[in-house]
């Protein structure tokens, strides 16, 4: 009787493992795309490379001297001791072949101290050289429910045979406009 009760769970686990191994549901063909030339760097932006990820951030942002564990790169805009905006390439994420799974796992890291997080949906995004990529936008509210000045965007990128990173762009709306976020996202690419 106990074996019968476990059978559906075993079948479901095996099906999920097969889907992950095949890369199903990720939007990718399973083939490894050719490495792409990075998109052009817009005026007023600085190109950077973190491992196989290339992107550009606004001029005037400085590199994070000691990035947190798991970050491959970080740059920020500061006013004194206050970080007003930042971009990070985070490598310590689930290494699975489906960007949506990476995004779902990474969403817990987009929380902001004391703020209510409002997570948007997973939106497919084209990243040159990537097998699969999704974008998730976040907005925040104060503990009292009022809109916060903070925003964040995660771009979860899968490349190669299942390597994954998250590019996180976050900051104060007064210093990081949605148009700036879009511009950074447009510069992301994977290079060999």
Image (spheres, helix red, strand yellow):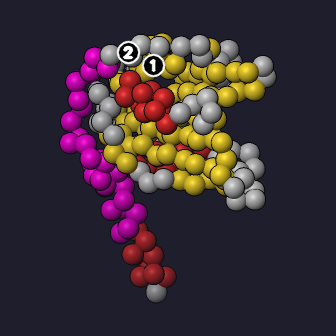
Q: Tag on residue 56?
A: 1
What is the crowding at mark 2: few (fewer than 14 residues within 10 Å), some, or many (at least 20)? some
Provide the residue span drawn in magenta: 11-39
Position above or below: 32 against 38: below
Q: Is residue 78 left or right of residue 48?
A: right
Q: Is residue 94 left or right of residue 14?
A: right
Q: Are marks 2 and 1 in contact (CB under 8 Å)?
A: yes
Residue 92 found in image quarter: top right
Residue at the bottom extreme? 1
> Residue at the spot x=59%, y=13% of the render?
60
Rendered location of residue 187, percent (x, y)? 38, 24
Q: Quadrant of the C terminus?
A: top left
Q: Which residue is mark 2?
A: 41
The x, y position of residue 134, in whole percent, is: 38, 43
Q: Residue at x 45, y 76 (%)?
A: 6
Quarter-of-image position of residue 51: top left
Camera-nearest residue between 148 and 51: 148
Q: How many marks?
A: 2
In-image side of 100 versus 28 (left or right): right
């Amino acid at each position: 009787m106990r074996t019968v009760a476990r059978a559906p769970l075993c079948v479901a686990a095996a099906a999920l493992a097969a889907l992950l191994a095949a890369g199903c549901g990720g939007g990718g063909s399973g083939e490894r795309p050719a490495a792409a030339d990075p998109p052009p760097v817009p005026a007023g932006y600085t190109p950077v490379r973190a491992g196989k990820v290339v992107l550009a951030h606004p001029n005037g942002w400085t590199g994070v001297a000691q990035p947190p564990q798991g970050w491959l790169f970080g740059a920020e805009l500061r006013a004194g001791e206050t970080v007003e905006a930042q971009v990070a390439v985070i490598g310590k994420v689930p290494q699975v072949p489906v960007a949506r799974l990476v995004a779902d796992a990474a969403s817990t890291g987009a929380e902001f101290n004391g703020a209510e997080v409002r997570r948007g949906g997973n939106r497919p995004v084209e990243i040159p050289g990537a097998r699969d990529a999704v974008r998730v936008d976040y907005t925040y509210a104060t503990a009292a429910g009022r809109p916060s000045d903070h925003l964040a965007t995660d771009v979860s990128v899968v490349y190669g045979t299942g390597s994954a990173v998250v590019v996180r762009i976050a900051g104060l709306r007064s210093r990081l406009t949605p148009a700036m976020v879009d511009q950074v996202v447009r510069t992301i690419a994977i290079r060999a």
